Amino acid sequence: MKCKVHDCFRTSSTATRVVYALLFLMTSIVAWVMESDWVVNQLDKVAQGYLKQNCPENTCYGTLAVYRIMFTLSMFHLILSACTYGATTSRGVQGGIQNGYWGPKFIFLVFGCVGCFFIPNGFFEFWGKYIAIVGAVLFMLFQMFLLVDFAHSLTEMLLAQWEDSDNQIWGFLLAVLTFGGLALALIMTILGFVYFGTPECHLNQVFLSVNLVAAFVLCLISISEAVREFNPSSGLAQASVVVVYATYLVCSAMSSEPTPAPGSGTTSCNPLSSSDAAQTTTVVLGALLTFAVVSYSTTSSAMKGTVFGGADEGYVGLETNVEDGGDDDDDRYPTDDEKQGSVYSYSFYHFVFAIAAMYVAMLVTNWNTVTSNSGLTTVGRSWASVWVRAATSWVVLGLYVWTLVAPVLLPDREFY
């Protein structure tokens, strides 16, 4: 059966998540552009002093604009989270709110962003310094938990497929994941020492050395007899996923180091900061990677979250109708994968998007670091960003080690 585009997008959970992700991407790009020198100058003219702040060269205009836009996006998803709380089916009012009304939603976002420019600056200063930063840290914790869960789930799936089908392709994929991941982490570490860990750059050498030693210890723990006694599937495959991500975070931290001020006498340890072309490439790749991570994190969090609330009466009636054979009206929903109930938690999904918006607000403003620039802001280029990413890599490694040793230290509790 054919379906109209509107119906397909209104009933398909996958299409719904794609639309929300695109709205998130578009809004994030608009917020990023707000940090550009041209937009700052235009805001200076239009605001007539309303946005005036005590900061050098009017650089607060862009920061406050980012806060306003991402605050609107965050509130947009928090409102949707409240409206869809307890939803168990896509056919009720809450399902309609989740999967439809795209026109009103888009209008709300646009007018919400415009309306936020009439709210006093003090509110957004407070939101950016205290509320958004808490939401950003919470989102990063979600990312870390999801990564560890992904490492365990992926390897267990490959092992199960290999054992059940006796097909060697699964064993080959497992070997590629294990040794390919460890090799990639080693290559990134070597390149990090070559380009970022020059003799004058002691901090970068510490970052790389700590990560290398921690990764080695993690691998030893993952294959130790004590750990494998409680979790036989534990091994280097899971460890390789975590090590690659932690090494990426360290390299990302070093590439986030800002260019030293002229005449400061400080040696630049970030070769990417000296090339405009390299900066542009870094910004584009960083934006794409950020979007991919945010999309995966929000979708994975939603799919793993339980559906809140009790069963909906409308869903019970629908389930009975389906069991009895259904009716011809179901042909109107050929792409509906939620006929038997919602396949993910709508409310939790929007909550993760809300804190993801706070994370992007911190990312675009370089974690509340105000600097003067003549063009587009290089996302994440500040010392605050450096330490946040470096610390995140350490927490990721520590979190994974805990998942390995917790069953050994607490044998009376169930972890797997």
Image: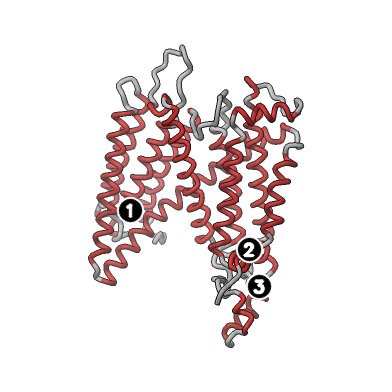
Q: Is residue 230 left or right of 374 when viewed as pictured?
A: left
Helix, strand or loop status at disc 2: helix
**Residue depth check, mark 1 versus mark 2: number of the one nearer the observer:** 2
Helix, strand or loop status at disc 3: loop
Pick whichever, 318 or 39, lies toward us.
39
Residue 88 seen = no
Label pair 1/2, CB-CB below 8 angstroms: no
Label 1 Cα crowd, 10 Å radius (few <14 / some 14-19 / many 20+): many
Instruction: Say if 5 sits above or below 149 in the image.
Output: below
* Mark 3 to mark 2 CA distance (whole Å): 17 Å
What is the quadrant of residue 216 in the picture?
top left
Helix, strand or loop status at disc 1: helix
Which label was assigned to residue 367? none
Instruction: Say if 93 sits above or below 380 in the image.
Output: below
* Mark 1 to mark 2 CA distance (whole Å): 36 Å
Pick whichever, 174 or 304, lies toward us.
174
Residue 142 appears at what percent x and percent y? Answer: 50, 49
* Colour treatment of the image: secondary structure
On-image quarter of the C terminus: bottom left
**Residue lying at the far bottom of the rendered structure:** 324
Q: Which residue is mark 2?
A: 99
Q: Which residue is mark 3?
A: 312
Dot placed on the residue nearer the N-terminal end, 1 or 2: 2
Pick whichever, 229 or 280, lies toward us.
280
In the image, what residue type sits under mark 1? Gln
Q: Residue at x 69, y 57 (%)?
A: 103
In the image, what residue type sits under mark 2? Asn
Q: Which residue is mark 1?
A: 238
Q: Residue at x 75, y 42 (%)?
A: 115
